[in-house]
């Protein structure tokens, strides 16, 4: 989350009047995150989150898929933020020339990576399993905008050796391996695509919230699992934590069993997911200019993950 677009109080007041949530009392920008503009909104009836989807970060044509997926999960009883409808029944609107949604506020907070325990990881695995179960019934389809074609574009265009000597050759080698062995006909459906600890809230030791659906798409479930393992099962020094991994897999399997093909391709997908974040973070890192609103992620943590899985 972040604040790229400033909103005046009169404009927001008029926007809120379209909902049956009482009059606007206060609002404040949410500084965390990188992709969209977000505000906490306080009205006579409660607290909400306003999201404006930024055209330079998100394909605005994909917003109905993201919003619909979050709403779908909420209807299945998952702790995703339900989207608030206007008095006329609209979920998706426009504010300051950007697609905008108002959603319920989720209580809880994320757990920092070094504070994660196997219990947190088991709960996260269960949550992802429940999401994939629910995703089977989500009918809209959206291609993955961060798929192999984009990785290859980044591999060709980015000056990767400016980040680390030899990274260009490592990425080229990995891309050849992944392109040659990429599977077909795996179990799939709607996936989150960015299932990181900062997108999952806990309260009193229990999962209480799930946010940030702007990477959601239709893809293999095992790829989503691999992204999550990369995100949850390493510490801040990019050291793999076996106990976290075991707990995450146990939690996922308690809801959604991995089939034979998924077990076979899991090591491969762990490498692929690590590479995806090496490249996306490298693109952020190399294109960053002083004064930019967004602080780029450091790609080195995922370079270490990729090296770990290449030697497994």
Image (cartoon, helix red, strand yellow):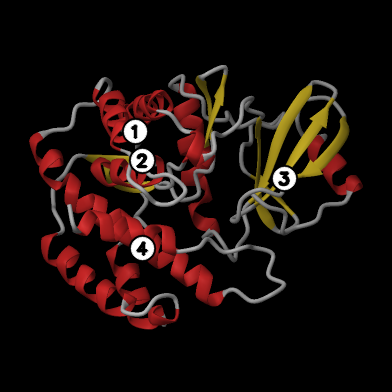
* Contact flag, marks 2 and 4 (Cβ < 8 Å): no
Q: Residue at x 53, y 41 (%)?
A: 198
Report the side of 236 relative to 308 (left or right): right
Mark 2, secondary structure of its residue: loop
Please name the residue that numbered disc 3 is placed on.
30
Query: Nearer the observer, disc 1 or disc 3?
Result: 1
Q: Nearer the viewer, mark 3 or mark 4?
A: 4
| Between discs 2 and 4, the one toward the N terminus | 2
Question: Which residue does the image show at 19% across and 39% down from the upper left?
Answer: 187
Residue occupied by mark 2: 233
Q: Secondary structure at mark 3?
A: loop
Q: Position of residue 108 (x, y in %)?
A: 61, 26
Residue at (37% x, 51% y) in the render? 142
Crowding around mark 3 (Cα neighbors within 10 Å: few <14, some 14 to 19, many 20+) is: some
Among the two numbered marks 2 and 3 on one chain, the one whose residue lies closer to the N terminus: 3
User: In the figure, is residue 249 to the left or right of 93?
Assistant: left
Q: Nearer the viewer, mark 2 or mark 3?
A: 2
Task: State the separation of the CA atoms marked 1 and 4.
Answer: 20 Å
What is the crowding at mark 1: few (fewer than 14 residues within 10 Å), some, or many (at least 20)? many
212 vs 271, left or right, is right
Mark 1 or mark 2, which has the lower sequence index? 2
**Where does residue 101 sit, x and y in percent of width and height?**
65, 41
In the picture of the structure, the residue carrying the numbered disc 1 is: 244
Distance in Å between CA atoms under marks 1 and 2: 5 Å
Label for residue 32? none
CB contact under 8 Å: marks 2 and 3? no
Using the image, tell me which numbered label, if any, was put on residue 303.
Answer: 4
Q: Of label 1 and label 3, which has the lower sequence position? A: 3
Disc with the residue nearer the chain's start (3 vs 4): 3
Residue 91: give x, y in percent of width and height: 61, 37
Q: CA distance from mark 2 to mark 3?
A: 27 Å
């Amino acid at each position: 989350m972040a604040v790229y677009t400033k909103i005046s109080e009169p404009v927001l007041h008029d926007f809120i009047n379209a909902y049956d949530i009482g009059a606007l009392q206060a609002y404040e920008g949410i500084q965390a995150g990188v992709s969209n503009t977000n505000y906490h909104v306080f009205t006579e009836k409660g607290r909400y989150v306003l999201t404006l989807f930024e055209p330079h970060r998100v394909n605005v044509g994909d917003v109905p898929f993201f919003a619909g997926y979050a709403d779908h999960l909420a209807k299945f009883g998952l702790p995703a933020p339900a989207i608030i409808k206007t008095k006329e029944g609209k979920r998706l609107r426009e504010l300051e020339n950007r697609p905008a949604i108002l959603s319920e506020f989720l209580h809880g907070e994320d757990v920092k990576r070094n504070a994660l325990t196997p219990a947190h990881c088991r709960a996260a695995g269960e949550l992802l399993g429940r999401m994939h179960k629910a995703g089977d019934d989500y009918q809209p389809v959206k291609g993955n905008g961060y798929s192999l074609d984009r990785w290859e574009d980044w591999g060709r265009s980015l000056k990767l050796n400016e980040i680390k000597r030899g990274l260009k050759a490592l990425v080229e080698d990995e891309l050849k391996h992944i392109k040659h062995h990429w599977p077909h006909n795996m179990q799939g459906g709607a996936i989150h695509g960015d299932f990181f600890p900062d997108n999952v809230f806990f309260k009193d030791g229990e999962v209480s919230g799930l946010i940030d659906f702007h990477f959601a798409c239709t893809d293999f479930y095992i790829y989503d699992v691999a992204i999550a393992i990369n995100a949850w099962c390493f510490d801040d020094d990019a050291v793999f934590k076996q106990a976290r991994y075991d707990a995450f897999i146990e939690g996922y399997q308690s809801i959604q069993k991995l089939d034979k093909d998924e077990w076979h391709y899991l090591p491969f997908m762990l490498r692929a997911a690590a590479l995806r974040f090496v490249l996306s973070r490298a693109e952020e890192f190399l294109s960053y200019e002083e004064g930019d609103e967004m602080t780029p992620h450091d790609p080195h943590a995922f370079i270490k993950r990729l090296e770990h899985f290449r030697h497994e």
